[in-house]
Amino acid sequence: MQNALLIGLVVALVWFVEKMCGTPMVNRPLIISTLVGLVLGNLKLGVMIGASLELVFMGAIQVGAAVPPDILVGASLGTAFAIISGKGPAVALTLALPISLLSQSLKVIIFIVRSWFMKYAVKMAQHANVKGMHCLNFFGLILQCLMYFIVVFVALLFGSSAVTTFVNAIPQVIMNGLTVAGNLLPAVGFGLLLMPMMTKKNFLYFLLGFLMIAYGKMPILAVTLFGVILAFVVVFEFNKSDNNKHKNDTNEKSDKDNGVEDLFDA
């Protein structure tokens, strides 16, 4: 019960910090899985599971009204069940996705409940009740934090033993298959991330990174740092050159309009 209580509080606190501090991305799997591993006394395994889940959920970011799978609940419960059962990252990768999809539905329910308070927000805005609007927004945040706490606490309190028994009853052949499937999930995460990004121009950068790792045998950290430097050069240096060229073209056009070119040609 103590672990369920602590992990529930950690998840609720992480969501509170995420929304109160301007979205610092503390709700990502790499952070929440590490914290869960710390609570359960296995920090190393928590970091390993977080890194694996980060690859899977890399492209799961809420944009506008779109509600992606709930990474916070999926990563926290997937990590907790994996550590408690002693089966490691393979189980975490297998459980995290369905749990996050289920929690996505619960989040939509919270959004519906929060929409009931919109008429009160409109009235407060009409009367310039800024303090009341702050309190109403804060109440909505606390409501969602409470939802996260209840879901994680109940799942771990009543489901951890059942999940452990279920996982231990899985034959080794199926566990090997789950391990292989878990290793493929990061590729799926990369694929989902690349779908809206891949263009003819971006494909060259993707191909360059693939060649550096597949044939150059370079470590991922080195390729990442090279990518950061390349992005800096492309964004800042190339744009600077284009701006200077545009400025020179504008000046030349202005000189032609003023008759300067005709004067020197004569």
Image (cartoon, helix red, strand yellow):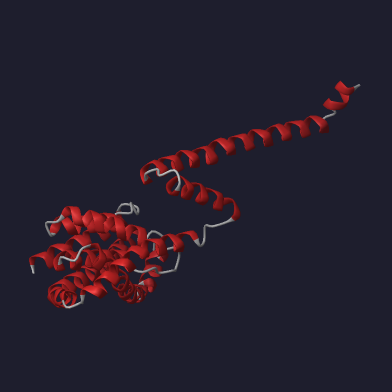
Residue 67, given in percent of the width and then of the height, sits at 40, 69
Residue 234, given in percent of the width and then of the height, sits at 54, 40
Front residue of this view, candidates 238 and 43: 43
The single residue placed furthest to the right in the displayed view is 266
Rendering quarter of residue 179: bottom left
Pick the quarter of the image with the C terminus.
top right
For the point 36% across and 43% down, the residue is 221
Rendering quarter of residue 133: bottom left
Residue 37, given in percent of the width and then of the height, sits at 17, 57
Q: Is residue 31 visible?
A: yes
Figure check: 202 above or below 170: above
Front residue of this view, candidates 115 and 52: 52
Front residue of this view, candidates 187 and 228: 187
The single residue placed furthest to the left in the displayed view is 2
Residue 176, given in percent of the width and then of the height, sits at 26, 69
Q: Relative to residue 14, is residue 64 drawn left or right?
A: right
Q: Is residue 27 visible?
A: no
Pick the quarter of the image with the N terminus.
bottom left
Figure check: 42 above or below 184: above
Q: Relative to residue 264, is residue 212 drawn left or right?
A: left
For the point 32% across and 67% down, the residue is 180
Figure check: 184 above or below 117: above
For the point 88% across and 26% down, the residue is 262
Front residue of this view, candidates 167 and 111: 167
